[in-house]
Image (spheres, grey):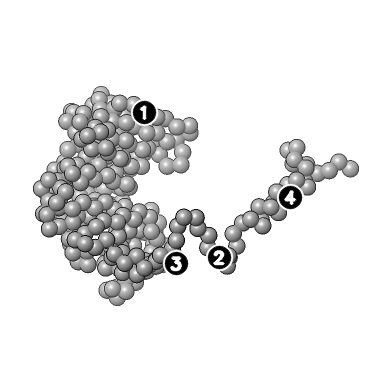
């Protein structure tokens, strides 16, 4: 009898490969492993998920901002021990000046909903000293409120966050970018009339209390009135600021991805109406990835 083979690989070889994989796989109860890293401290975040963390130095303290996805079916609205209230996942603020003992200062609730349908996943923070027209005594947190709003909070006192600005309602959000030195913000938003749930809104947040709308932006075919197939939705932008004069827009998640490279000056100062010609005007190039 011929030995059993799978697509030309002898069964015995497959069994050996499986055994070697199994003995090398981590098992429950195994000691932790690390290379050039040592665990110093941790915080359970009230059993909330952690998606985007960001650390800023504020008046001699190191403050950590953590964006959360929405809750789970088992814990859709965990209790905030600081207030005693059940709160939908949003943004946690911690003092990590002593990394051995992180201390929760506040939790700002987010939108109702599970996983990406709720919460407040992303965080960006600028100081009032950096922003051209900010209050130098303040720090400002930019975050999405689930998929419905964009918010700016005054976190000058990180234990007492205060809402400053709210923009919306929207039909989608994701990874924003905020230039602290200019105040220009590139918001991943979903605006009524656009044919995608995630495109770009450009705002001037140099004074967070007085946001100034600059333009809507996206790929040709996403704009109102377009026809045909809708290009893949935006994931998030990264700007090099005035010096680099480039904004890199990433489109797609896990498949059908594309990087669009844009001339920042043309994006901010070019004609804002979302026609095909105007949407292409600031584009420098594209990197289209395999589907």
Instruction: Please tell me the numbered disc located at residue 74.
Output: 3
Which residue is at a point 34% across and 70% down the rendered structure image? Answer: 101
Quadrant in the picture for residue 281: top left
Q: CA distance from mark 2 to mark 3?
A: 28 Å
Q: Position of residue 134 (x, y in %)?
A: 12, 51
Nearer the camera: disc 1 or disc 3: 1
Residue 25 in the image: x percent, y percent?
Answer: 61, 56
SS under mark 4: helix
Q: Where does the image place residue 55, in percent across and percent down from the top left?
A: 29, 56
Asked if residue 285 is positioned above or below residue 201 in the image, the reply reads above
Mark earlier in primary sequence (1, 2): 2
267 or 77, nearer to the observer: 267
Q: CA distance from mark 4 to mark 3?
A: 40 Å
Q: Earlier in the sequence, mark 4 or mark 3?
A: 4
Q: Is residue 208 left or right of residue 145?
A: left
Label 1 sits on residue: 286
Query: What mark, if any, has residue 16 been given in the picture?
Result: 4
191 vs 45: above or below: above
Question: Mark 1 or mark 2, which is nearer to you?
Answer: 2
Disc 1 and disc 3 in contact, CB within 8 angstroms = no
Is residue 7 visible from the viewing direction of this image? yes
Label 4 close to label 2 by CB (< 8 Å): no
Q: Secondary structure at mark 3?
A: loop
For disc 2, the neighbor class at 10 Å (few under 14, some 14 to 19, many from 20) is few
Dot in front, 2 or 3: 2
| Horizontal relation, residue 259 to residue 291: left or right | left
- Could you tell which of marks 4 and 2 lies nearer the N-terminus? 4
Q: For the residue labelled by badge 2, is the local secondary structure a helix, a strand or a loop?
A: loop
- Helix, strand or loop at label 1? It is strand
Tell me, for residue 31, which label it has, or none: 2
Mark 4, Cα crowd under 10 Å, few <14 / some 14-19 / many 20+, is few
Ranked by sequence position, the earlier of labels 2 and 3 is: 2
């Amino acid at each position: 009898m011929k030995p059993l083979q799978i697509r030309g690989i002898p069964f015995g070889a497959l069994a050996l490969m499986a055994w070697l994989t199994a003995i090398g796989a981590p098992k429950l109860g195994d000691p932790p492993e690390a290379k050039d890293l040592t665990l110093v401290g941790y915080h359970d975040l009230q059993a909330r998920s952690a998606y985007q963390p960001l650390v800023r130095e504020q008046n001699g303290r190191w403050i950590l901002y953590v964006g959360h996805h929405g809750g789970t079916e088992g814990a859709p609205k965990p209790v905030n021990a600081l207030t005693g209230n059940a709160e939908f996942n949003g943004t946690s603020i911690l003092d990590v000046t002593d990394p051995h003992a992180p201390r929760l200062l506040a939790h700002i609730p987010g939108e109702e909903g599970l996983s990406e349908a709720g919460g407040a996943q992303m965080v960006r923070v600028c100081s009032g000293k950096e922003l051209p027209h900010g209050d130098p005594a303040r720090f400002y947190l930019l975050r999405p409120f689930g998929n419905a709003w964009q918010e700016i909070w005054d976190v000058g006192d990180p234990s007492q966050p205060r809402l400053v600005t709210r923009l919306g309602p929207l039909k989608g959000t994701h990874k924003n970018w905020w230039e602290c030195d200019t105040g220009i913000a590139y918001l991943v938003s979903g605006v009524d009339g656009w044919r995608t749930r995630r495109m770009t809104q450009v705002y001037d947040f140099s004074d967070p209390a007085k946001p100034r709308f600059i333009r809507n932006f996206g790929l040709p075919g996403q704009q109102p009135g377009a026809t045909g197939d809708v290009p893949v939705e935006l994931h998030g932008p990264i700007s090099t600021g005035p010096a680099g004069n480039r904004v890199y827009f990433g489109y797609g998640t896990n498949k059908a991805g594309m990087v669009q490279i844009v001339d920042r000056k043309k994006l901010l100062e070019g004609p804002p109406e979302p026609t095909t010609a105007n949407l292409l005007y600031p584009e420098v190039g594209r990197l289209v990835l395999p589907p």
